[in-house]
Amino acid sequence: MIKQADIEFQSNLYQSKNPTRRWIHQERQAWVLQNIYDYSLPDSKVLEVGTGCGIYTTKIANWFSDITTLDVNSEFVNSAKSKFPKIDCQVANIETFKSAKKYDLIFMSEVLEHVSNTQDSLNTVFQHLKPSGFFILTTPNKYSTTELVAKLLKFPLLALLAKKIYGEPVDELGHINLKTRSQLISQLAKAGFTVVTSHNLAFYLPVIAEFGGEYGKKFLQSIERRFRKSYLLSNFLWTQCYVLKKERA
């Protein structure tokens, strides 16, 4: 059975046959890539935290000449090494990562929810960022509808049902460290980061997402736009996104 830790599983999320499932991943990907482009220069030294299936590595491989990418999963790292021989691909945990190199830009998309200690991870990123460097971060909102419904995937029969409905691999998200927006912003400030800009995206509702097709996706997109305008309702959107800056050494 294909699981979260498999390259094939990760890759499929961005090319899912289900319009809503595909949209909520591609929208996040587009936001991250746009901000990498906006907050970097061609000669920037870049650190990617969470190589995964290489969905970002593939895109930025031709943008920068100095890229380091990290992942705790050796399968992901070995795959990246074979595809990108000029990129420094390392098996490492961001909580304990150490390097003499300082980076102009660090990005970490959908990784923080998988680590055991948020503060240690954010402190490590801060330490490896150059003064005035940028940190691009995305992680789920703790009480988003996606996360609340995904808890049901812990039950094997429901996971099997979801797999049959989607007609493609489905697995528990494996998120062990979800944060509310206020919790995360507090820890970011403690690490020393200043928020440059923030964003919330992607709305999911069961049944509509699974059976609504393109019309269901468009309906959920319209709700997303409305919820985004409200501080309270935006907590139900799946992903909280930040561009952060290191203002001090």
Image (cartoon, rainbow, N blue to C red):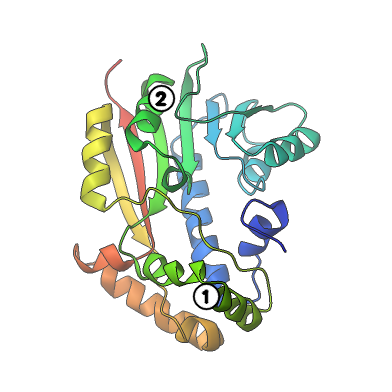
Residue 34 on image: x %, y %: 49, 48
* Image quarter hosting the C terminus: top left
Question: Looking at this view, is 93 or 232 the one in front?
Answer: 93
- Asked which secondary structure carries label 1, the reply is helix
- At x 64%, y 45%, the residue is 59
In the image, is residue 218 above or below residue 94?
below
- At x 69%, y 28%, the residue is 87
- Asked which secondary structure carries label 2, the reply is helix
Q: How many marks?
A: 2
In the image, is residue 133 above or below residue 145?
above
- At x 61%, y 63%, the residue is 13
Q: Residues within 10 Å of mark 1 (few under 14, many from 20)?
A: many
Residue 184 on image: x %, y %: 27, 44
Can the viewer see residue 131 in this picture? yes
- At x 43%, y 67%, the residue is 151
* Image quarter hosting the N terminus: bottom right
Q: Residues within 10 Å of mark 2 (few under 14, many from 20)?
A: some
The numbered dot on residue 20 is 1
What's the distance in space between the residues labelled 2 and 1, CA to CA?
Answer: 34 Å
Question: Looking at this view, is 156 or 182 the one in front?
Answer: 156
For badge 2, the amino acid type reads: Thr
- Please identify, in this view, whether the residue under mark 2 or under mark 1 is nearer the observer: 2
Which circle's residue, 2 or 1, is located before the other in the chain? 1
For disc 2, the marked residue is: 124
Residue 126 on image: x %, y %: 37, 25
Q: In terms of image quadrants, where is residue 52? A: top right
Residue 181 on image: x %, y %: 26, 51
For badge 1, the amino acid type reads: Thr
Question: Looking at this view, is 102 or 187 the one in front?
Answer: 187
